[in-house]
Image: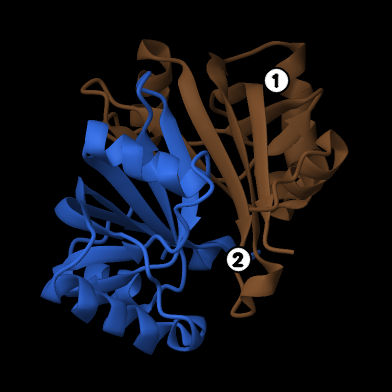
Chain colours: A blue, B brown
Amino acid sequence: MPTIDDPDDLRGRVAAAQVARLATLRGDGTPRLVPVTFALVDGLACSAVDEVKPKRSAKLARLADIERDPRVALLVDRYDEDWSTLWWVRIDGTAVVQTGGAFRERALDALAAKYPPYRSARPQGPLLVISPERWAGWSAS
Amino acid sequence: MPTIDDPDDLRGRVAAAQVARLATLRGDGTPRLVPVTFALVDGLACSAVDEVKPKRSAKLARLADIERDPRVALLVDRYDEDWSTLWWVRIDGTAVVQTGGAFRERALDALAAKYPPYRSARPQGPLLVISPERWAGWSAS
């Protein structure tokens, strides 16, 4: 199994990805999976939460998970019918929720630069900030 | 947030997806994320594990996770620059590993029917079988 070991390669694949899948941990310890948009800022993976209402929304659940247990995983991958082109990169780390501050504004700028919809409607809600503790990657070729 | 409630709609989106992301739980309780190919057979999500060597491979780790704690999540989603077309479907359930038997053969047939590479090289390893306990879905439109 050809692992990707080069940190620049791992980081470059993640930075270029438009979507990632985030796993948080529910109160009962089960994994909660959602797709997320994100941007890498100062080596941190940042994802905006632009809706926290209604109270029972999946996005609020994600924030409650992190406040209870900060351990998360983020996965970026490529799928194609040609399996020789497959790869994935996984970040394991811990997440915090930021509701204000200069870093959050800078991360929202990076998200707006990456995603046109965020330019016309800048996210108003909390920012989820993942500190990577371990990067892992695999490539078929 | 427009949830997808129709069971046929949820199932149809998952059945048509070529790739899903699987979360298992490591021994320390952290989520392990990997992309997987899969097929729905009798309402069960089946994924082949075609390499169990070397011993330290990510695929073996996934099997060890499930034998330790069967709780898993499987996510299928669509990403597009047009955010009005986004959707995701999530299955929460429990997984078992099957190393033989008639169901495994039938699932391998379904995988081969769905994925041409499995026709030329039928998976020889264990089959991961997920019993869905809860389906959830969201669509932007």
Which circle marks residue B104 in the picture? 1
Q: Residue at x 79, y 33 (%)?
A: B109
Which residue is under mark 2? A80
**x, y percent for residue A140:** 43, 60
As helix, strand or loop, the secondary structure at mark 2 comes to loop
Q: Is residue A94 left or right of residue A126?
A: left
Q: Residue at x 62, y 73 (%)?
A: B83
Q: Quadrant of residue B81?
A: bottom right
- The image shows residue A129, relative to residue B61, as above or below, that is below
Residue type for callout 1: Arg
Q: Is residue A42 visible?
A: no
- The image shows residue A12, relative to residue A133, as above or below, that is below
* Callout 1: chain: B
- Residue lying at the far front in this picture: please name it: A54
Q: Residue at x 36, y 63 (%)?
A: A125
- The image shows residue B88, relative to residue B64, as above or below, that is below
**x, y percent for residue B51:** 45, 36
